[in-house]
Amino acid sequence: MALSTREGANAPRINLYSDTQTLPTPAMRRAMAEAPVGDEQSFADPSVNALCERVAVLLGHEAAVFLPSGTMCNEISIRVHCRPGDEVIAEASCHILNFEGGGPAALSGVQIAPIPGERGIYTAEQAEAAIRPEHRYAPRSALLEVENTANMGGGTVWPLEAVQAVTDVARKHGLATHLDGARLPNAVVASGTAAADYGACFDSAWIDLSKGLGCPVGAVLAGSSAFIDEAWRWKQRMGGAMRQAGILAAAGLHALDRHWDRLAEDHANAALLADALAQIDGVSVEPCETNILFFDVGGTGRSAPDIAERAGAAGLRIGAMGPTRMRAVTHLDVDRADCEEAARILAEAAA
Ligand SMILES: *Cc1c(COP(=O)(O)O)cnc(C)c1O
């Protein structure tokens, strides 16, 4: 695709670094330009209101709030559900623990009890074992978090029964529950499970607009009306309250209509890439369930950063996630031919 004309002369020809790299399509830009807008802080922005109403229903909740990022959805949720000194139970590779700048500690004064899961997924038994006994020596277990799909797990999809099993344990012990649904749309498309069925398992749940859905900015957090009222107070305090944000919300509405079902194409392209990379000597691919593909290049004798650099010189941007572990993410701005070309570039870079 002609990414370079829109992104500038130095853009890679093919960008598999992340699904955050998408640029708004011409149709999305038109929808943004034509959006009815108002002051979202006064609930006077029709586009923001429509987006929030739509995502609340989509996720099986009463209400929703539009936020600038998924990180803010996570951080505000933790702040609302927990008190300083509390503990959040989550999988060890999760975003809140590894990629939010220590936000849970800095902003909420909580610590995280990481569960070593299997490709980002943990069991009810592990959740049960992670819950602290009621004793003044122990931190209070306050919140259980699920990330679906699990990013560093390899874009893995939590089966609905697995979600229900861990959230049932949480509820039994009086913990609140939170869904990091940055890529919930991918989980929904891959599994056929309704977003509302996933969402209803949790006290708070959100989706990102700026991952697979292809928007430039934004995420939407859903929960009960009481939860969203509290979330709004934190949005205000943290400086996340906006004004004519309908310009951004319109991109979200457009994406919910046009970019949701097509995630299946991203999944097919990632599977194609997985098959092609598996043919390269010394490369071993991890299972690929959605749009994220991890693979190990240790057997090629080259490091991941080395291969990423060689691929970059040939026009392919791709992530080195460890000494020999690499990540490719498919999205709206890469098609089947791009993935075939990417596999050719990687075969040469690995040689
Ligand atoms: C990207 C991501 C986030 C954060 O979303 P931003 O919109 O980039 O702040 C949170 N959780 C997961 C699993 C993510 O992949």
Image: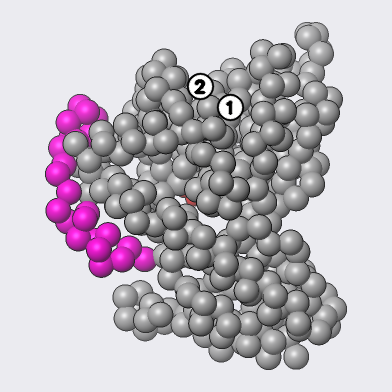
Label 1 Cα crowd, 10 Å radius (few <14 / some 14-19 / many 20+): many
Can residue 305 be seen in the rendering of this structure? no
Q: Is mark 1 on a helix, strand or loop?
A: loop
Q: Where residue 189 sits: x, y (%)? A: 53, 51
Is 26 covered by the magenta stretch?
yes
- Residue with the mark numbered 2: 80
Residue in the foreground of this view, choosing between 248 and 165: 165
272 vs 235, left or right, is right
Disc 1 or disc 2, which is closer to the eye?
1
- Tell me what residue is drawn at x 52 percent, y 65 percent: 266
Q: Residue at x 49, y 59 (%)?
A: 263
| Above or below: residue 271 compared with residue 184 | below
**The C terminus sits in image quarter:** bottom right
At x 25% / y 33%, what residue is drawn?
49
Question: Residue 119's x, y, as percent?
Answer: 75, 50
Q: Residues in magenta?
A: 23-45
Residue 226 horizontal/vertical position (percent): 41, 15
**Which SS class for mark 2?**
helix
| Residue, disc 1 | 201
Question: What colour scheme was applied to this rendering of the protein?
Answer: one colour
Is 207 above or below relative to 85?
below
Q: Tell me if mark 2 has few (under 14), some (14-19) or many (20+) residues whose alpha carbon lies within 10 angstroms of its own.
A: some
236 with respect to 260 (left or right): left
